[in-house]
Image: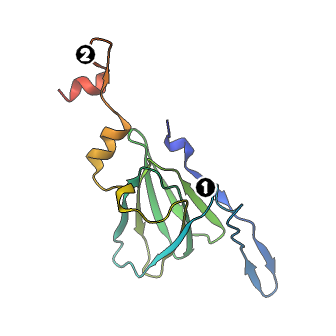
Amino acid sequence: MITINDVKLIKLNTFLDSEGSLVPIEFDSTAPFEVKRVFYVYGVHNQNDRGEHSHHKTKQFLICLNGEIKVLCDDGDVKKEWILNKPNEGLYIPNLIWDEQTYMSADSVLLVLANTHYDEDDYINDYNQFKKIKNPIKRGWRGQRLGAYHDEIK
């Protein structure tokens, strides 16, 4: 099962010289998956949240190119936050992890690499539905509910 421990902050190769810095993104090695889609988000004002969803299949690699972005990830049981504010670090978020981004400054730019093409049906936009997918009701061989979590939701 995919957990919060599968979310990883990855330092990217950086080449420095007197004229500036270069961070190459090679589609077959930078992200921990084959990249099929790239997009970026900018112009988010007033610390508005973005994301607020999960994916059935899509894995993402988030890089904050400018500004500062707080990323909250949730595996259905455990939540953890990361601050992205370096263009040579990326956050790998596997599928079936709920994530939300808060843009801490109006000049923030988030670059996202994804392993799938856009598919509206891949999105899980309802947090309660996400929780049901991550924590299905467990039943014994006679069909009875098992586990404390499920006893609470009778």
Residue drawn at point x = 55 percent, y = 59 percent: 115
- Helix, strand or loop under label 1: strand
Residue drawn at point x = 42 percent, y = 80 percent: 106
- Can the viewer see residue 31? yes
Whole-percent x, y for residue 117 in the image = 49, 65
Foreground disc of the pair 2, 1: 2
In the image, is residue 81 above or below residue 101?
Answer: above
Residue ID for mark 2 = 144
The quarter of the picture where residue 16 lies is bottom right
- In the picture, the disc for residue 9 is 1
Residue drawn at point x = 43 percent, y = 55 percent: 72
Kind of residue at badge 2 = Gln
- Can the viewer see residue 111? no
- Residue with the most extreme left position: 154
Whole-percent x, y for residue 37 in the image = 54, 68
Residue drawn at point x = 25 percent, y = 16 percent: 144
Q: Going by the image, does 151 lie left or right of 55? A: left
Q: Crowding near pointer 2: few (<14 within 10 Å), some, many (20+)?
A: few
Q: Crowding near pointer 1: few (<14 within 10 Å), some, many (20+)?
A: some
Q: Going by the image, does 111 lie left or right of 53? A: right
Tag 2–tag 1 contact (CB < 8 Å): no
Q: CA distance from mark 2 to mark 1?
A: 41 Å
- Helix, strand or loop under label 2: loop
- Comparing 92 with 115, the one in front is 115
- Comparing 145 with 68, the one in front is 145
Kind of residue at badge 1 = Leu
In the image, is residue 149 above or below residue 53?
Answer: above
